[in-house]
Image (tube, rainbow, N blue to C red):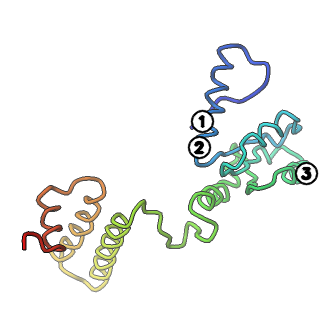
Amino acid sequence: VDTAGIREHAESVEEMGIQRARRKMREADLVLFLVDASTPFTEQDRMLYESIGDTRKVVVLNKIDIAAQEAVDTLARKFYGAPVVRISAKRHRGLPELQEAIYGSIIGEDCGLSERCSCAPNVRHRTVLEQSLAAAGRLQEGLRTGVTADLAAVEVQAALDHLGDIVGLTTADDVLDRIFAQFCIGK
């Protein structure tokens, strides 16, 4: 959720937005604390950062293209307990590093975007994703070796069917078939 800026001495309507922003910040899984690196860091900024508490966070120092390098370095040292990423949104600099920091904060530091890590919400989803990936792998191998279009279509359909299990495209009959295949019912 992108929230309004939080500052002291706001008008009543703006204050309502600020209170909403504070509530969303407390409820968030991850807070991106965006700092203008070209302006001085204030006591109010420090207090706002500390108010995030134990919520996972990534500090984003923006406008590094117009800020003095020494000032950016000094600013980066003010933050603790969170990764600090330096970007220039205007010049699109540092965005891959920001993406990695966000991913690392959510999934874990030991799993970069290029690595295989599980982020499935449950075991069933993980199994279905693995089955879909296996079908895609078989398709890739078949295409590499010159498999016919009808056999390739079988693997495409298998991958789609597995993904359909996650997004709710599987029918009740499919679920019952799976239950009866895995469990002995009625004996």
Q: Which residue is mark 3?
A: 74
Q: Nearer the viewer, mark 2 or mark 3?
A: 2
Q: Which element type, helix, strand or loop, lies under badge 3?
A: helix
Which residue is more in the foreground, 97 or 19?
Answer: 19
Q: Which residue is mark 1?
A: 24
Q: Is residue 75 left or right of residue 143?
A: right
Residue 22 coordinates in the image, percent (x, y): 66, 32
Q: Residues within 10 Å of mark 1 (few under 14, many from 20)?
A: some
Q: Residue 123, relative to residue 101: is it above or below?
A: below
Q: Residue furthest bottom?
A: 145
Q: State the separation of the CA atoms marked 2 and 3.
A: 28 Å
Residue 33 coordinates in the image, percent (x, y): 71, 44
Q: Residue 103, relative to residue 144: is it above or below?
A: above
Q: Are marks 2 and 3 in contact (CB under 8 Å)?
A: no
Give the quarter of the figure containing the N terminus. Answer: top right
Q: Which element type, helix, strand or loop, lies under badge 2?
A: loop
The amino acid on which the numbered mark 2 sits, given as a three-letter code, is Ala
Disc number for residue 28: 2
Q: Are marks 2 and 1 in contact (CB under 8 Å)?
A: yes
Q: Residues within 10 Å of mark 2 (few under 14, many from 20)?
A: some
The amino acid on which the numbered mark 1 sits, given as a three-letter code, is Lys
Which residue is more in the foreground, 139 or 42?
Answer: 42
Disc number for residue 141: none
Q: Nearer the viewer, mark 3 or mark 1?
A: 1
Q: Residues within 10 Å of mark 3 (few under 14, many from 20)?
A: few
The amino acid on which the numbered mark 3 sits, given as a three-letter code, is Thr
Q: Residue 117, relative to residue 70: is it above or below?
A: below
Give the quarter of the figure containing the C terminus. Answer: bottom left
Q: Residue 102, relative to residue 44: is it above or below?
A: below
Q: State the separation of the CA atoms marked 2 and 1.
A: 6 Å
